[in-house]
Image: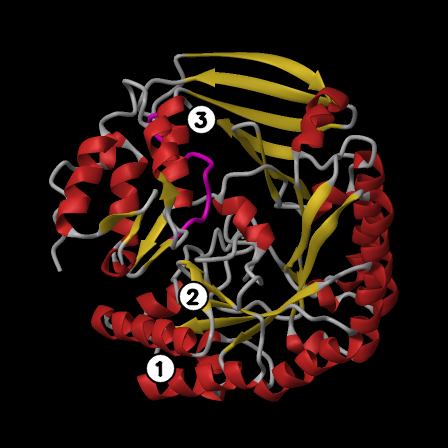
Amino acid sequence: MEGNAICRSQRRLRPIEMRSFSNSKVRMVPSLLVIINLIGMFPCSSHYYIYVATKGDISLTHFTYGKDLSQEPVRAHKESVTAEEWVAGASGATSLYVHVPFCFHKCHYCDFFSIVGNASQHELFVERVTKELKYLRPFLGEIETVFIGGGTPTLLSEPLLQKLVFSIKENVTFFKDYEWTIEANPETVNRAKADLLVSAGVNRVSVGAQSFNLKMLKNLERWHDPESVGISVGAFRSAGIKNINLDLIYSIPGQTKSILNEDLQCLLDLSPEHLSCYTLTYEQNTPLLHRLHVGDVTRIEHELEAEMLDIVQNTLSSSGYLQYEISNFAKFGYECRHNLSYWNNKYWWPVGPSASGHLYGKRWKNTPRLSEYLDTSDLSPVIDIEELGIDAQVGESFMLGLRLIKGMSISLVEQLLDRPETRWRKKVIENYLVNGYLVQEGSFLRLSSEGVRFADCVISDLLMQEESTTDSSIDE
């Protein structure tokens, strides 16, 4: 889950450490803002682009819309750019996201692009990614963070996993003090894989624990033995990994506060440097949402979910973990730099099917079709891209920046609101300062501890004018 959120999603962008986007708007849940996709998110945008890569060229169709994107475009024209022109800006990216789409089982809550049962295509996929990385090599600048997400990257066999990570090592120029993360399912980890990852330069691992309770894992249709989490952490520690994240999901159907406390204690017993703790979300087109609709599972009540958030925050805080983002906690100095690049609106380049990228205000998504990806060479086919207008860019900055617990610098806020088309947010901010959901602390504007519970409401009011209210009252 970690690292996908914008990039999984991001993410899962799940309440995530972000990874790659899907075709969804911002999804609001109690206590969290789950960012799933920026494509098509802003009805106030006047333009968007669709690019389709066809070998050497990229066909571009530029549509001009009115404020309602559901209507037909006012006008459209086509042009094309070469692949070289498209990739020329890659030197501005400081992060790289690589998506490995394979899983041995599809968890019922997961809406990421993943494929089950295609072992015969693993080798073809790794060969294809290697070609893409070789093509990108002369265009990429120095990379500060790399994140390999999925799917389940560690599902690859040892030879293929080795080829993948060494292809990254050979074709990427790393910043001296880099961070390189790979996601791992605990059932797919052994000491040999841990050793080869370390030998390539991977220095951070994100293990999907989700829960240590067999019944909760069954409710999620998550297939792993809880004991395998500790075994995999031990393998990574023995191999030399000193920076480990563990994912936890709470507010699972049937979960009690007692079960959550037990899960948290199991996490703490493993002494990870970082923890990503997400409320369960019911995403479109997932088996979990279908089970909710037919009555097979019952959603946790909002009040209980809020109490669970308090338990997570208080337990981890008292155990030496700093909450630096709505869903993320770290020991001092171990904040996830890759995900911070998302929240700080920096630039990253995507590799692999369904991965998303961001450069200079443009966000795009690679094709989510494995067959189409495998049938091409060099750059991945790109299915869509959006270039936001000024007001939408400012809304995006608030959406991302207020997820950070420290918030946004007042100087940045003033800069963002120093335009006629963006100043309407001043009244929204004033109202939330009065009711206490936003606070100004020193030189930063941030969500209050109570405001974190209603982050979805606050941020959606700042996102775009059509959905904002000058009355920022919230019915509790």
Sooner in the amino-acid sequence: mark 2 or mark 3:
2
Relative to the observer, which residue lies in front, 86 or 325?
Answer: 325
Point out which mark residue 278 bears: 2
Residue at 73% over, 67% down: 154
Image quadrant occupied by the N terminus: bottom right
Point out which mark residue 100 bears: none
Highlighted magenta segment, given as a residue range = 34-45
Question: Callout 2 environment at 10 Å: few (<14), some (14 to 19), or many (20+)?
Answer: many
Q: Position of residue 308 (x, y in %)?
A: 31, 75
Which residue is tagged 3?
388
Q: Nearer the viewer, mark 2 or mark 1?
A: 2
Q: Amino acid at mark 3?
A: Leu
Q: Position of residue 156 (x, y in %)?
A: 77, 65
Question: Callout 1 environment at 10 Å: few (<14), some (14 to 19), or many (20+)?
Answer: some
Q: Position of residue 87 (x, y in %)?
A: 72, 27
- How far apart, in angstroms, are the residues tagged by discs 1 and 3? 41 Å
Which residue is tagged 1?
255
The colour scheme of the drawn protein is secondary structure
Q: Position of residue 88 (x, y in %)?
A: 72, 24
